[in-house]
Amino acid sequence: MRPDRKRIDSSGRTLLIAFGVVAVAFTLSTVLAERSDIGIRRAALLIAQNSAPSVGHLSLLRADLRRITLLADGQRDAAIEGRPRFDRKRMDAALASLEGDWARYRALPTFPGEKDLVPPAQAAADDLARAVERVGVMDQAGDSEGLRAALDGDLAPAANRLDGAALRLIDFNAARGGELGQIIGRLGRQSVINAIVLDSLCLMLTVATGFLAWRLVRRYTTLLERRADELELFAGRVAHDVVGPLSAASLALDLVARGGAPERIARAVDSGRAGIQRTRLIADGLLAFARAGARPEAGAEADVAEVIGGAVQEISGDAAGHGIALVSELEAPGAVACNAGVLASLVSNLLRNAVKYAGGVAAPRIVVRARVIDERLGRGRVRIEVEDNGPGLPADLGDQAFEPYVRGPHADLPGIGLGLATVKRIADAHGGRVWVRSSPGAGCTFTVELPAVQAEVSVPRPSRALSRRALNSSSSR
């Protein structure tokens, strides 16, 4: 997988994680808010359904108890004056109201610990009911002394005990209501704090997620732009690299069309076939290279001597036409881990660049060398050099010569500035490197190093004289 694709995939995973964290934070915020709301509702419900009604019913009970006490005090005064005046109807009504308030209180749920306070109050209420009944009996019998004894000895103590028990129950329920109010306040404050913290976290995570999404879109857009640029450069490279072989094929067809001796026509046909085959080799190699994501194909290897030989044969016509001596010095270079068509594109670009700029000197000369270097445990590198004695490169050009569409001096010469850029792109993609040594006015040497395959191809070492004879033979056609 390409590094830029890995970065996009990594950014995508990070974005998904960020979205997940935002969702978790939002869910957590909702859960905590709902939990606080449940606690507040529960406490408010206890106040509304237990504490407040209990205090209300017990307060009404005490009011009824006060009415009973006032009626008893009036009856006592009447008994002292010797004129019994017991209003049984009002006393029974007050007692019934008290018992109703007590029953309504008993029907309510109780707090923990409240049940321990109920028996004394219930006992006092029962004693009060019996005391009222006894007072009625004494009044009906006309027994003033007995009536006064029942009022002072039975009814008044029972009323006091019931009032004290009711007051303790009121205090108990009021205290529980206060505690519930504090719980409501604390939960409310905690809910607000949780909401602020989690909302701030969600906001920050949302901003971070938005930034990650923006970066992912930018990276993807950059990748698309880069792919578009690479596609444009690939089209330019293919067009640039197939011009030479097609020119040779076109020239061969022109020679065939002119006619002549059968031997000459046969040589022209062979040359045209070789140009077309080389065109197909380069186009297929570059296409496979592009399909592999501008990376080396697995298991690809190319015979360096064979590829250089084909490139030399292809360029020899142009070199002879410019009076350039073309020499190859191959020291059993073996094979490199590279597609043959791609390597052919690399070598042809170096040679054509040298032919283009080698003219203008008294005895132009181009030397192409190839040898294995830095061989360790069967794993080395193959160095390919193309040296010329032309005008060289300006000192300020440097590595810019390998940038797309950058051209050296004599820019009026044919070309669009993709040859050396193609060489660098291929070398970098295959784990190699490329550089140039230039001496203005004395020529320059372009050097490429590529990884060699472990099993080297056995190639006989040609001599200089043999190379020159082959070139001269090619030039004469």
Image: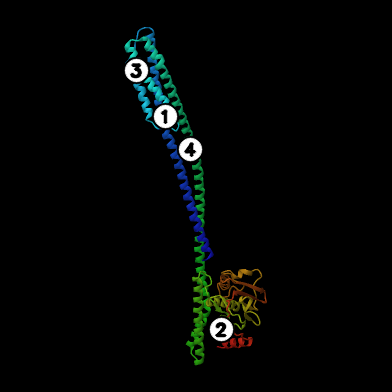
Q: How far apart are marks 4 and 1 (CA)?
A: 20 Å
Q: What residue type is labelled 4?
A: Leu
Label 4 neighbour load within 10 Å: few <14, some 14-19, many 20+: many
Q: Distance between the residues labelled 1 and 2?
A: 108 Å
Labels 4, 3: front one: 3
Is tag 4's residue or tag 1's residue first in the polypeptide sequence?
Answer: 1
Picture quadrant where residue 440 is located = bottom right
Q: What residue type is labelled 2?
A: Gln
Task: Tell me which label, 4 or 3, sits earlier in the chain.
Answer: 3
Q: Distance between the residues labelled 4 and 3?
A: 51 Å
Name the amino acid type tagged 3.
Glu
Mark 1 in CB contact with mark 2 (< 8 angstroms): no
- Please give the label number shown on residue 313: 2
What is the distance, in whole Å, between disc 1 and disc 3 at their CAs?
32 Å
Which residue does the image show at 36% across and 7% down from the upper left? 82
Q: In this view, does 151 lie above or below 211?
A: above
